[in-house]
Amino acid sequence: MYLGVCDSTGHGIPGAFMSLLNVSFLNEALMNEKIEQPGDILEKVRSLLKSVFQQERQDGMDGILIRYNPKTSMLSYAAANNAPILIRDGSYRIFEYDKIPVGHSSKTERFKTYALEIQPGDMLYLITDGFPDQFGGSLNKKYKYRPFYEFLLSISHLPTEEQKELVKSEFLTWQNGNEQVDDVMVLGIRF
């Protein structure tokens, strides 16, 4: 099973166009090219994006692509500027990620495929930067990552439907009437 949480560059029509390209290229790598490793899939998408945008435009995406095998409980993933968060036994762990986007970049390293063993009861979160980067609160500042991880930890023991409602409520409370600055994606998976 493959699952991706991605954040394409751009807003409005250009952002929608980038999203369509990115989804199409992910499908190309998975379905037509039959590439299996998440890091190799992101490499293929990067290559396809570079061929479409031959100038050094900063178009592409950040994201996490996971591959999960329920028979072995092994999860492999590739992460571009985003890190998976795993909550196990009352603490959270931020996993490794590559500090490069999928698309043109001055960095030339290849995307790595990381692996971890999943245990029953684990809660895995895949997020984009939309929630941590939202301005709000009493001081009208960004929410930031560490407080967001702590918030996820505080609700991780609850049923996922309840978590969904609490994430929405926390976002709206923090936003405090400010304009939403970016798309927000928070995906939680209980194993």
Image (cartoon, rainbow, N blue to C red):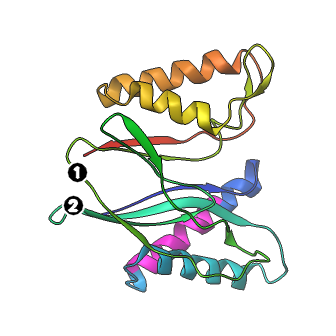
Q: Position of residue 114 (x, y in %)?
A: 43, 70
Task: Quadrant for the N terminus, please.
Answer: bottom left
Q: Quadrant of residue 107?
A: bottom right
- Count every numbered label the image shows and give the total: 2
State the residue lying farthest toward the left.
71
Tag 1's secondary structure? loop
Q: Quadrant of residue 72?
A: bottom left
Magenta residue check for 172 = no
43 and 50: which one is in front? 43
The residue singled out by tag 1 in the image is: 119
What stretch of residues is rendered in magenta? Answer: 19-31
Tag 2's secondary structure? loop
Q: Position of residue 27 (x, y in %)?
A: 46, 72
Question: Contact, CB < 8 Å: mark 1 with mark 2?
Answer: yes
- Residue at (66, 65) in percent of width and height: 99
**Which amino acid lies under the numbered mark 2 shown in the image of this protein?**
Ser
**Which amino acid lies under the numbered mark 1 shown in the image of this protein?**
Gln
The residue singled out by tag 2 in the image is: 73
- Residue at (40, 62) in percent of width and height: 66
Which SS type dominates the magenta stretch?
Answer: helix
In the figure, is residue 55 to the left or right of 69? right
* Mark 1 crowd level (few <14, some 14–19, many ≥20, 10 Å Cα): few
Magenta residue check for 21 = yes
